[in-house]
Image: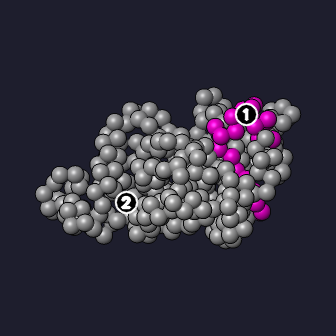
């Protein structure tokens, strides 16, 4: 007798353990063998193997995939997402390197990126944080100022129109207030987190896995673990130069068609850096990412 395949969506991932929503029924899923190329947000076809358990047989084509990588392996963050929200705060201080790397990843995956500046009620740090966030606003990335704890109603009014009707992911360093934002936007998120932890046997380590929360039929939020590094070893040099949006007006105008934009004479990118049209910080990151892409171990 042939077993029936079910269509489901992955709503949580913890190592090679996955939780899939099959029409409202939650199933604990595994991949066959040692494969772990499944992400939260994936639409999958699963085969029931036991009560409450299933094996993932195939993954549908994705419209987007966000992931980070070191020189040895990749870490899938989420699939089929429309918007990426990078959460920063007035305190603790945030990493410009991490923010820029996340923006590069979003550009490479063709995902719309926004910044959320949280904890604006900490007024003595606000101007400094606002100036730093303004650097990204000048590049064309929207920045939304909120205070999840001090001004919940205003925060909800600012963010809900931005997430409604879409699948979005929130990322950021630990301590930026990401969990407070999730709990504000998703009533019952704490309860859902405990339930997911129980199914995935991840106990109290609720911040070590990625999970999706549904707000309504057309709106979902994905919460990812806080992290301090965002490797992009998987991006080639050609992908990198296009992922820096301020580079784009100058691409194709270098003296040499195969210019690496590192030290070549007549490089339009380097000229733009020297003239202040492209920041030294962003070009230094590009240089570092090109170096990392060359260290990839296949």
Q: Is residue 96 visible?
A: yes
Question: In this view, which residue lies farthest toward the top?
Answer: 33
Question: Where residue 56 appears, x then y in whole percent?
Answer: 70, 39
Report the front residue among 77 and 186. 186
Identify the residue under disc 2: 244
Disc ID at residue 204: 1
In the rendered image, residue 48 lying in the magenta stretch gets the answer: no
Horizontal arrangement in the rendering, residue 217 relative to residue 77 (left or right): right
Horizontal arrangement in the rendering, residue 124 relative to residue 199 (left or right): left
Residue pictured at 65% horizontal, 33% vertical: 16
Query: Which of disc 2 and disc 1 is earlier in sequence?
Result: 1
Locate the N terminus by quadrant. Answer: top right
Question: Where residue 293 appears, x then y in whole percent?
Answer: 35, 42
Q: Quadrant of residue 221?
A: bottom right
Report the front residue among 51 and 249. 249
Disc ID at residue 116: none
Q: Is residue 156 visible?
A: no
Question: In this view, which residue lies farthest toward the front?
Answer: 124
Q: How far apart, in angstroms, are the residues tagged by discs 1 and 2? A: 38 Å
In the rendered image, residue 216 lying in the magenta stretch gets the answer: yes
Residue pictured at 54% horizontal, 46% vertical: 173
Report the front residue among 86 and 242. 86
10 Å crowding of disc 2: few (<14), some (14-19), many (20+): many
Label 2: element kind: loop
Compared with 155, 54 (above or below) is: above
Horizontal arrangement in the rendering, residue 191 relative to residue 174 (left or right): right
Numbered range of the magenta stretch: 195-217
Residue pictured at 64% horizontal, 70% vertical: 158
Q: How many marks?
A: 2
């Amino acid at each position: 007798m042939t077993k029936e395949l079910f269509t489901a969506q992955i709503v949580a991932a913890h190592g090679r353990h996955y939780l899939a929503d099959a029409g409202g029924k939650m199933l604990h899923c595994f991949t066959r063998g040692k494969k772990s190329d499944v992400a939260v947000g994936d639409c999958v076809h699963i085969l029931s193997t036991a009560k409450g358990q299933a094996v993932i047989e195939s993954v549908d084509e994705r419209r987007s995939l966000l992931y980070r990588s070191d020189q040895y392996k990749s870490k899938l963050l989420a699939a089929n997402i429309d918007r990426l929200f990078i959460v920063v705060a007035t305190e603790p201080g945030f990493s410009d390197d991490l923010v820029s790397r996340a923006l590069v990843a979003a550009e490479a995956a063709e995902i719309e990126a926004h910044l959320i500046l949280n904890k604006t009620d900490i007024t003595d740090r606000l101007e400094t944080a606002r100036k730093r966030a303004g650097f990204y606003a000048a590049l064309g990335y929207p920045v939304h100022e909120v205070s999840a704890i001090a001004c919940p109603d205003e925060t909800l009014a600012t963010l809900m129109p931005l997430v409604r009707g879409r699948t979005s992911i929130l990322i950021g360093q630990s301590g930026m207030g990401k969990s407070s934002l999730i709990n504000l936007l998703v009533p019952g998120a704490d309860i859902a987190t405990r339930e997911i932890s129980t199914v995935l046997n991840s106990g109290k380590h609720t911040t070590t896995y990625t999970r999706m929360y549904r707000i309504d039929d057309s709106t979902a939020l994905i919460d990812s673990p806080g992290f301090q590094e965002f490797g992009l070893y998987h991006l080639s040099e050609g992908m990198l130069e296009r992922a820096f949006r301020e580079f784009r007006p100058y691409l194709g105008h270098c003296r040499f068609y195969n210019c690496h934009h590192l030290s070549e004479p007549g490089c339009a990118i380097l000229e733009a850096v020297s003239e202040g049209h492209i920041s030294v910080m962003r070009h230094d990151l590009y240089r570092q990412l090109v170096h990392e892409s060359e260290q990839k171990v296949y």
